[in-house]
Structures are given as C-alpha cells and as structure tokens.
Image: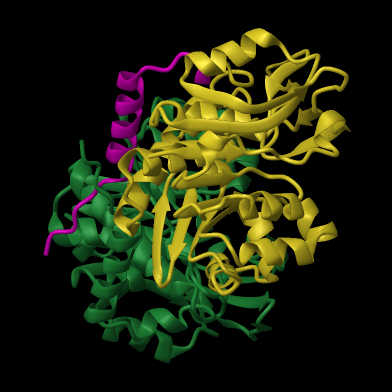
Chain colours: A green, B yellow
Amino acid sequence: MSLVTIGSVAFDALETPFGKTDKIVGGAATYITLAASYFTANNHLVGIVGGDFPQDMIQTLQAHGVNTDGLQIDPEGKTFFWSGRYHSDMNERDTLDTQLGVFENWSPVLPDATQGAEFLMLGNMVPALQHETLRRFAQRPKFVMLDTMNLWMDIAKEDLLSVLQDIDCLTINDSEARQLSGEYSLRKAAKKILTMGPKTLIIKKGEHGALLFQGDRIFFCPALPLEEVFDPTGAGDTFAGGFIGYLAKTGDISFENMKRAIIYGSAMASFCVEKFGTERMLHLTQDEIQTRVLSFVQLASFDIVE
Amino acid sequence: MSLVTIGSVAFDALETPFGKTDKIVGGAATYITLAASYFTANNHLVGIVGGDFPQDMIQTLQAHGVNTDGLQIDPEGKTFFWSGRYHSDMNERDTLDTQLGVFENWSPVLPDATQGAEFLMLGNMVPALQHETLRRFAQRPKFVMLDTMNLWMDIAKEDLLSVLQDIDCLTINDSEARQLSGEYSLRKAAKKILTMGPKTLIIKKGEHGALLFQGDRIFFCPALPLEEVFDPTGAGDTFAGGFIGYLAKTGDISFENMKRAIIYGSAMASFCVEKFGTERMLHLTQDEIQTRVLSFVQLASFDIVE
C-alpha cells in the first residue's frame, strides 16, 4: 500500500567518539523513507531542500524507489542544517548548531499522487505544520503516525495536543513520554498518553529497546546488543520507517502485525547505527534484513513449559 | 535438587520517594532464599546474624521451607546493618550507613546437610570469603553462581578474578560489567568476562531487563513495565534466587532452561519491588507467580511470518 512521509531532509555534521563528519545528508524524512524503501515501492517523500542539496542524493533516493515529486527545491535557499556532538556513552548529545534554512517557512505541498495514500508518517516538525499537512489530505489516510520531540512540548504544547487527537500512532522516546504525561512510570505515562488521541503508542528506549502500547496490551521489543554503536543519528527515524514500511507492505494494522513491524523497525535501526549517517541504509539486502530479524527471534524467544 | 545460599542476612533502613522504613530485615541471602523457596524445598541458608536479629523472622524463613541450620547466631554481636536513600528515579541510591557487625569477621560454617548440594549461590560478599566457602565443599556443586559488586572490583580485584575462575555463572549489573571488562558495549564486555572463568554471564539492567550470555548465544529478558516501583531493594537478589531456584527445581542447566529460569527470576523481582523490603516476597502464591510469568510471555512474544 501507499506510504507518504513528510518531514525534514537535511544536512548533519556529527561528532561521535569514533570520528567526525563534514556535512552529510540526514533529516528525519530521509531516514524514514530509506528504511521504508526496503518494504514498500509505493513510497512518497514530501519535504524541502535548498539549492545546496546534492542532486545525486535525490537520485539515490529514487534508485531506492522513493517518489521524490513532493521534494521541493528552493534554489535560492539553504538546506536545513544540524550539527551535534555525542557524549561518550552515545545516549546523550549536545546540539552545536541548528540552521533551519528553507525548512523555516515551509508549507508542504502534496502532489496528486500522494492523495489516497493509506499510510502517513508525519516526521518530527512544528506540530501545527503536521496538523495542517494532515488536513490537506482529501481523504484521511487509514493509518497516521506522528513523531515529535521535547522542544514542541515546551513551546507548542497546545498545537501538539491538538494534532495528537487526529492521529493513530505516536512514537516518542522515554524521556519525552515522561514529559508529555508528567508520569515517571512508563506504564502510567502510556495510559495517560493513550487518552490524548492516539490508540497506539510506541515508546523508544534506544539501546534498551521499545515498548508498544495499545489499550491494555503491551509488547516489548529488545534492542539488539551490538558490539559497537558507531553513530546513533537517525536510529529513531529508521525504526519508525521500518515499522510503518512493514505495515504498508502488509496492509495489516492488527496488534499482532504491529509487533512484527516493531521487530522489523528495530532490525533496521540496528543497521543504521553501524555507520555514520545514512551510509549503512543505502546498501542493505533483503537477506541481511531477514538474518537480522532472525537474530531478534533468537534473542527474545523462550518457551514456558508446565 | 539441593540449593545452598551463602551471603548476608541483614537489617536495612530505607528511604524511597514513597516513604521510609525503620530497620527491616534484608540482606542478599534473605532475598535469595525467599525467592528460591517458591521453587525448591531443599533450600539451605548459610549466614550469620547477631543477638538483635528477630527470632520470628527465622521462623518465617523456616515456614518457607528454608533450612536455617547454617544460620549462625552470635548473641554478643550485632547484625549487619545498611541504610540507603533512593533518588527520585529509583535507579540510583546513596549509602547512608554501613555497619558490618558480625558479618565483618565471619567465616561460614557448612552444616553436613549442605554437603553434596548440586546448586550453590554465593551472594555478594568479600570475594576471598566466597572462594574459601566454595573450597569447603567436599564435592564441588554442579552449578556455582556468584554475585558481586563494584566495591570488590575496586579493592579486591585479584581475589575476585581468582574466584571467577572456579564458578559457572556470574551475575552482575550493567555498570559492573563495564567496570570489570573495561568495555562499554555490553556485548564486548560479555565476551571478555566469559574468558575470565564463568561459562554463563547474566547482566542485570534493572528496569531495562536482563541479558543472558553463554558462548555465542544471547537471550534478552525484559523487565515488566510496572505502574509503580515502590522499593528496588533486593530486586537483584530476588532475581538471582528465582533463577537458581528454578534451575534447582528442574535440575536442568541447559541454555533453553536458563532462559525459562531468567523469566521466573524476573517475575519474582517484579513482585519484590512492589512493597518495602521482603514484604511482598513473604506471601506469594504459585498462582500469582504463574500469572506473572504469563505476563512476560505476553509482553515478549511475537511471531515472524514469511
């Protein structure tokens, strides 16, 4: 089925304990569509870049089957730029620089081919813009997923609460879930957030896995213990892209299938962190993905006899 | 099969965000044997207390089927006392007071009935004493498990490395695994620690679950997301007691059965934190335990179709 992803396409400059990069291509929507591209061929990217964005990256996305008709190019403007430095444990990072560029006053334009899409991923950005974009769909997609961040809880809480009422699934990390709900216990936090609109909540815990909540049901997906985490940038978006990509591929939004989708999302994220930026996400094979998913099966499977 | 547990029996005074206690009974061996008592009736406790230790707690342990013949009472001495305060997130705590009392110069005495035991749990204490106790078994138990802590890595590393060479299974938390191995990645840490002696390693991650390593195999057991963690004291020991108690009950130390044992250990730990001290561990039913184990099955089960 058809997936539309709306969000940032950007340049990142990264410093990790393993090295640093110059400006490399990043952005939530880039990671999401790349991850989803391994699951669905009906994969639309809606975003904006400046005249400084490399044409060959657009071609790379197209080679992955991503429809880039919705990627506006503002030849006079500059692409969104973010620069950050990770702490030695990779769990925290400092933002060194943010230049919104063309992203600042962007109003997404939906190409005709995106109308009628069944799956919509609203990548992290100003909540009012996420809401406005959702309203531009003549027919509401059957499954709308949204990512957000602590910043919007600080400065645009009302808009965030408003868009939450119109989505199906929210994905945030554990500290954001605590901030949004005012509850430290993730179980209590989830209960509260599920009254705010979304029927499904995914709480990402980075190296500690992810929790899926729906009604009274909970599923926990571990993160694969890796020998080395090279660069965590984009892992959360890659996870979301794998998740919604798998749902779009199967067209099945039952809880049982969401559990599978979370495993696929986690598998994709486990690749993402193995190299800088999107590098590892550009050349995966279906065999590699299946083998990685089997690692999750081995990691998490047990049977209780009695 | 027969289980012998050696370690501290103590008084704790606790402060958590939910309240504080006067001196209540705690200690590693107390939690371990209590948890194990739900699995095996052949359950020996070896420890020492002072004349101030309440006789009714000894009777309570006996009522749980714990053989307390190895619990020495020094009427002139004082029971080991520890006092601590938890931070608001419950993941960290400060030690306010430690008085070793009769534990300081203790040399464990093994009652005859403990000889021939198949399972031995060496609770956290001075590594040289753990080693000496192990040597006092005329016939080495078939499965020897050891718990330790960062303090001994700081001040008794050589003794610790020495006893590690003679055990089967080590259980430590994530920061201790990092300290012992000098590796941040838990996968790398495990690889290194498995060359130090134990064939099996369990890394406890508290609210983030536990990892079981053996050779190239890894199993991850989640922690149950709880609405409230009331008091984490003893959770790690309760986990260990449930784990080795289940192994002793089944007599099966295959990797597949250890996975089950970790689920049972985690289930027991999830009860422990629901009330102060040992309170919740005193009145569990087999039905409650089975229901809790089924919650883990639901939490972690998925199937990959394809």
Residue found 52% across the figure and 41% down from its top: B240
Q: Quadrant of the C terminus of chain B?
A: bottom left
Left or right of A70, for residue A8: right
Magenta residue span: B280-306
State whether residue A69 appears in this view: yes
Q: Position of residue A73 (x, y in %)?
A: 44, 77
Q: Residue furthest left?
A: B306
> Residue A12, how many percent across, how many down?
59, 75
Q: Percent from the top left, x then y, of residue A234?
A: 49, 67
Using the image as rendered, state which of residue B160 and residue B224 is in the foreground: B160
Frontmost residue, B4 versus A38: B4
How many discs appear?
Answer: 0
Give above or below for B253 relative to B249.
below
Q: Is residue B230 left or right of residue A113?
A: right
| Point 42% across, 66% down: residue | A269
Q: Main secondary structure of the magenta part?
A: helix
State which quadrant residue B255 falls in: bottom left
Query: Which quarter of the figure has residue A30?
Result: bottom left
* Residue placed most toward the observer, B75 or A4: B75
- Identify the residue at horizontal 56%, vertical 73% (top origin): B188
Please tell me which residue is depicted at 85% across the width and 39% down the height of the picture. B105
Residue B134 position within the rendered picture, expressed as x and y whole percent measured from the top left: 62, 52
Q: Is residue B53 above or below residue B265?
A: above
Residue at the outermost top position: B56
